[in-house]
Image: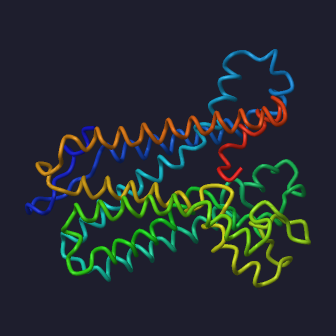
Amino acid sequence: MAVSSNIVSSCSGRKFERFVTLDFARGLAIVVMLFLHIVQRTLNIDALFNTIEQQPIINLLALSLIPFYGGLAGFFLIISAASNMVSMYRDLHRGKSVQALVLKQVFGGFLLLIFAMLCEGLIGYQGLVGNFFKHLNNPAATDWTVMLWRWNFFETIHTIAWCLIINGCVQGLLSLKGSWQNTKRMIISYGILAVIIVALTQPMWDLVRTIVPGYPFGSYPSGNTLFLPEIGTESFWQIFRAPFLNPLSAPMEPIFPYLAVSFLGSIIGIVLSKPRENITKKFPKSMFLVGLAMFIGGLVGVFYSIAAVMSARDFDAAAAFYMTIINHRA
């Protein structure tokens, strides 16, 4: 990667510039995610499955790639985390206090979280405004109740918001007494934390399911899904706890295990914040091999899961399962 050529460290008293590669990668992730969402909402998947023997190769390819590349949330998150860590180190090099850094991260994370909730429930294409524009030819068909329950739908932007908050607190604790200058210790610490998050993922899901039986796919007596309580229908306690349960065990992109991805991005950001001459040439290769190993492991897991469903039931069930693989708790 040519990333290191696009920034210089203030450790040597020089001015910071932007990472062109990080900006490009983030833009690429956004464009691909938007394209996938557009295709998902215009492609009649059920009709394609019913006539799968008659479909051209391009449609079959779309059916194969959409669920797989729907998992690009991890790519977007790791780029965001790396950029955020570069920003934090820039502030630390400029003399900003650790306390001010933590406050900035936590405040920014909560603002993003509020925006994410407004986007999903009110102003987004799945929220009230989007629902209204879908029914401009018949406004009476608008589902005005969507904002009462979709506000808690957990997506990538919610994950990023919670990772901003948690990463800010973690970075603050690790930076006490100037420890942030020991980049080797910081990298090791984030690596250990990433492993811990992955190890705790299943126990955390089980714990939440024990506290709230059937979470997240079960239902309230009203019929509403457990992770999407409706304001005015569910109790105050059920509404209050919802934004805290979803980050731990939401159907899509909970911080267990996605916080581990964020921690890996933080490692990249720490390394890229070092003076160019101090960045070992082995680092890009090492990160590539780690990513490749994770990718292959995930790919094997996907094929194993599909084969297990097909063995237990049939091809149609396996195909239906694959189409929900973007829903990582499925």
The answer to whether residue 18 is left or right of residue 84 is left
The answer to whether residue 102 is left or right of residue 258 is left
Q: How is the image coloured?
A: rainbow
Instruction: Give above or below for 25 relative to 65.
Output: below
At which x and y percent is residue 146?
Answer: 79, 63
* Residue visible at 79% across and 70% down in the picture: 213
Front residue of 308 and 91: 308
The answer to whether residue 148 is left or right of residue 248 is right
Number of marks in the rendered image = 0
* Residue visible at 40% across and 75% down in the picture: 169
Q: Please tell me in which quadrant of the rendered image residue 248 appears.
A: bottom right
At which x and y percent is residue 288?
Answer: 35, 39
* Residue visible at 57% across and 56% down in the picture: 156
Front residue of 143 and 180: 180
At which x and y percent is residue 177?
Answer: 21, 81
* Residue visible at 73% across and 37% down in the picture: 308
Instruction: Give above or below for 20 relative to 120.
Output: above
At which x and y percent is residue 225?
Answer: 81, 64
Image quarter in which the N terminus is found: top left
